[in-house]
Image (cartoon, grey):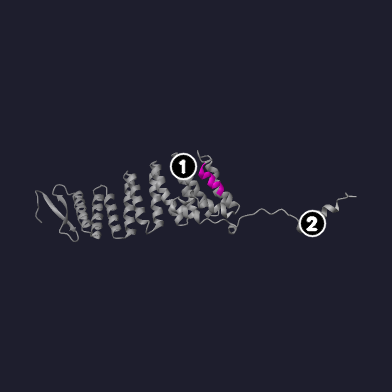
Amino acid sequence: MKATAAGTKPVTYGRLPSTGHISTVSTSFTKWKPDYDSAASEYAKAAVAFKNAKQFEQAKDAYVKEAEYHTENKAYPFVALEQAGMMMKDMKRMGEAIQYIEKASMMYVENGTPDTAAMALDRAGKLIEPVSVEKAVDLYQKAASVFENEDRLRQAVELLGKASRLLVRLRRLDEAAASIQKEKNMYKEIENYPTCFKKTIAQVLVHLHRSDFVAAEKCVRESYSIPGFSGSEDCAAMEQLLQGYDEQDEDVVNRVCNSPLLKYMDNDYAKLAVTLKVPGGGKKKKPPAAPQGGAGGSQAAAEEDDYEGGLC
């Protein structure tokens, strides 16, 4: 093949599907080093063209090739990998989409851009949530962990909250209880005390659905140390709820659980509130009635008569 410029010979690496473009990596007689940067750039252009033409499979292939050449060039391939994942999303192939995005996010972390990694994981969680709640939980937890490692607690706790709610939806209540406790600790650390109160309510509901009254009571007791909790509406409601539950008073439990305070929580917690049942079939405990007349009264009177004249 003839040189197209002084001392330069094009090396063909293959024709992109459905286009007339040929990807070339240039070398020279004095410096035999492939031009991966130019090749990556050409694949990036081709990927955009395929994407605009709604040829998502070909666009994905082009993004993957772009990522490969960036890797060979010691450059950053993660943006191209994330875009490949988005092409899979457009084809409704969510499993493959998440694989590409997860791989990209790990590369973001390795290359010193953890914030971008966490945001990519958050986006992936939103994509997969309608299809697989379990996978969404995993992605939100990973994103929260990345932010937490960077001391970005406000961002971390928001993602952790998403994971907690989905764990409740999945009825993985033991894990949900632990996740909510972690949220509560973070909110306490950033001094967002009113949200701590709401997390206490969520904890109580989760523990009562686990039939663990002791753990629910402990959550409220520990919350007394949070500034403003004692005497708050949240505190009063939880004290009433625990008392009603302990006494098997269905009326009290229903009244608290259907109050606006609990009814307008996040949907997953609101469902816990309206479906909470008291133990023992939900019958209200009644104190034993004092004997009034009848056989019991007559018997007691008879016993008194026996000793009316004294022991002798």
| Res. 288 image quadrant | bottom right
Q: Is residue 119 left or right of residue 63?
A: right
Find residue 194 and name its label: 1
Q: Residue at the location (39% across, 50% down)? A: 142
Of 38 and 144, which appears nearest the observer? 144
Q: How many marks?
A: 2
Does residue 60 show up? yes
| Res. 283 image quadrant | bottom right
Sequence-wise first label, 2 or 1: 1
Of 176 and 243, which appears nearest the observer? 243
Task: Please check the rendered image and state whether residue 65 is part of the magenta-colored stretch, yes or no.
Answer: no
Q: Which residues are drawn in magenta?
A: 232-240
Q: How would you classify the magenta stretch by its main secondary structure? A: helix
Residue lying at the far right in this picture: please name it: 312
Find residue 298 and name its label: 2
Element on which disc 2 rests: helix
Amino acid type at circle 2 is Ser
Does residue 206 show up? no
Q: Is residue 196 left or right of residue 127?
A: right
Q: Is residue 10 left or right of residue 239?
A: left
Element on which disc 1 rests: helix
Q: Position of residue 209 (x, y in %)?
A: 52, 55
Of 285 and 181, which appears nearest the observer? 285
Amino acid type at circle 1 is Pro
Are there few (<14), some (14-19), or many (20+) residues within 10 Å of tag 1?
Answer: some
Q: Residue at the location (24% across, 54% down)? A: 63
Q: Position of residue 241 (x, y in %)?
A: 55, 50
Above or below residue 15? Residue 105 is above
Cα gap from disc 2 to disc 1, whole angstroms: 60 Å
Of 207 and 34, which appears nearest the observer? 207
